[in-house]
Image (spheres, rainbow, N blue to C red):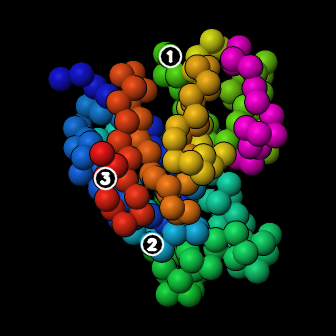
Amino acid sequence: MRARTIAVGDIHGCAAALAALLEAIKPAKEDTLVFLGDYVDRGPDSRGVIEQVLTLEKQCHVVPLLGNHEVMLLDALNNGAEGAGWLQYGGTETLASYEWELGNIPPTHLDFLKSLRRYHETATHFFVHANYIADIPLAEQPDYVLYWEHLFASLPARHESGKTAIVGHTAQRGGEIRDLGHVICIDTYCHGGGWLTALDVDTGEVWQADKQGRMRT
């Protein structure tokens, strides 16, 4: 069986959507699922999302990237929930999923958040949460660009590596993947009424589910 590399876009607490996607994908042990970050905030069940990703690590190879919403949550853990505007950008929903106390976040979830990666790459693709600078090696990309910069603010050329970029962060409110050839954005606005998207980067196969867990047909 072919080992698949499947990217998953911004989940934002939409645990039912993630469960539906995983049921449809049926990850095998040889598959790699790359999560592009933003597991938490805005949607109803951030805790359930992280639980699912942790469980998935027992089934296949999981590569979890860091998104800007995890950056804000980690800052809140260090400096208090009122800092950095986290609560105003969806943190309230995350806090609710942990019964309104940051202290209720389990150690396994804290370890997960602290272990998230800046980027991932294969022989043909690389994966970042938000954006990149075309003429800078991935290891040297600024944090602001990797986690915060939207594609509408700066649309990059093909990266110097020649690889295709798979990104999230810039919400495609119409629910459709934005495929520019050298960069593909799969944040399709699940929490706001769109879809959670998973993409087999080698074949182009797509799976999408809404926040209620209904698959797109």
- Residue 107 in sight: no
Q: Residues within 10 Å of mark 3 (few under 14, many from 20)?
A: some
Mark 3 lies on a secondary structure that is: loop
Q: Is residue 148 magenta?
A: yes
User: From the viewer's perspective, is residue 183 above or below residue 213?
Assistant: above
Mark 2 lies on a secondary structure that is: loop
* Residue identified by numbered label 3: 215
Front-most of residues 142 and 215: 215
* Residue identified by numbered label 2: 45
User: Outermost residue, left direction?
Assistant: 1
Residue at 35 percent across and 30 percent down: it is 205
Residue at 70 percent across and 46 percent down: it is 147
Main secondary structure found in the magenta portion: loop
Quarter occupied by residue 18 = bottom left
Can you tell which mark lies on residue 171? none
Quarter that holds the N terminus: top left
Specify which label sits upstream in the sequence, 3 or 2.
2
Please provide percent x and percent y for residue 102. 58, 80
Residue at 64 percent across and 73 percent down: it is 91
Going by the numbered disc 2, the residue's amino acid type is Asp
Q: Label 3, label 1: how many angstroms apart (C-alpha)?
A: 29 Å
User: From the viewer's perspective, is residue 98 above or below residue 27?
Assistant: below
- Residue span colored magenta: 146-160
Q: Residues within 10 Å of mark 1 (few under 14, many from 20)?
A: few
User: From the viewer's perspective, is residue 209 above or below residue 178?
Assistant: below
Mark 1 lies on a secondary structure that is: loop
Specify which label sits upstream in the sequence, 2 or 1.
2
User: Outermost residue, bottom direction?
Assistant: 100
Residue at 52 percent across and 69 percent down: it is 43
* Residue identified by numbered label 1: 124
